Amino acid sequence: MEKIIYRPIGTIHTPYRNTKGVPNQPTAGKNVEGTVIMRPEFVAGLKDIEGFSHIFLIYHLHLSTGYSLIVKPFMHEHLRGVFATRSPKRPNSIGISIVRLVKVRGRTVYVKDVDIVDGTPLLDIKPYVPEDSRKVKRIGWLSERADKVKTPA
């Protein structure tokens, strides 16, 4: 299979008009508000979503062009394999964020803790449940910088 085609189910709106200033991790976007405007034909799929406090937003990194298998991560001087990073320059420009679900009104989903650029095409929503969380024993090269994750100035 050489080609896979996805269609957006909505559009994510945030205060970040371009990539400059976007938090480099979802936790660095604490309390940043955003909305998802669903395409009308997908609104019925939001039934029962308000029962969850957090959701996964899966989206297309629409401003990312090209990719590199070796990248220099933000706040780090060593080159790393792209699959050991969260770089947007990936073979498939897919992003994922866990956000706090505030409310749903019609076709608008209100969220907080956003680290996404305004106008990003939404591919899917999935509920986050506590069982998704795992006790992690290793975080690779990130252990050198884990205390430095914060919202860019």
Image (cartoon, grey):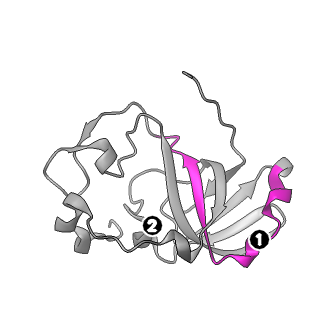
Q: Residue shown at 59%/69% (left/top)?
A: 128
Label whose residue precedes the other's in the sequence (1 or 2): 2
Residue 12 location, x and y as percent? 63, 55
**Residue 10: percent from left, percent from top:** 71, 50
Q: Quadrant of residue 33?
A: bottom right
Left or right: residue 91 versus residue 111 is left
The type of residue carrying mark 2 is: Pro
Q: Residue at x 47, y 62 (%)?
A: 115
Q: Is residue 95 left or right of residue 84?
A: right
Residue 17 in sight in this render: no
Q: Is residue 45 magenta?
A: yes
Magenta-colored span? 42-63
Residue position for label 1: 104
Q: Where the N terminus falls, by quadrant?
A: top right
Which residue is the site of mark 2?
26
Point 64% across, 78% down: residue: 53
Numbered disc 1: secondary structure = strand
Q: Amino acid at mark 1?
A: Val
Q: Is residue 51 above or below residue 138?
A: below
- Crowdedness near tag 1: few (<14), some (14–19) or many (≥20) residues, C-alpha within 10 Å: some
Q: Is residue 50 visible?
A: yes
- Counting from the top left corner in percent of width and height, residue 75 is at 21, 58
> In the picture shown, does residue 41 fall above or below 6?
below
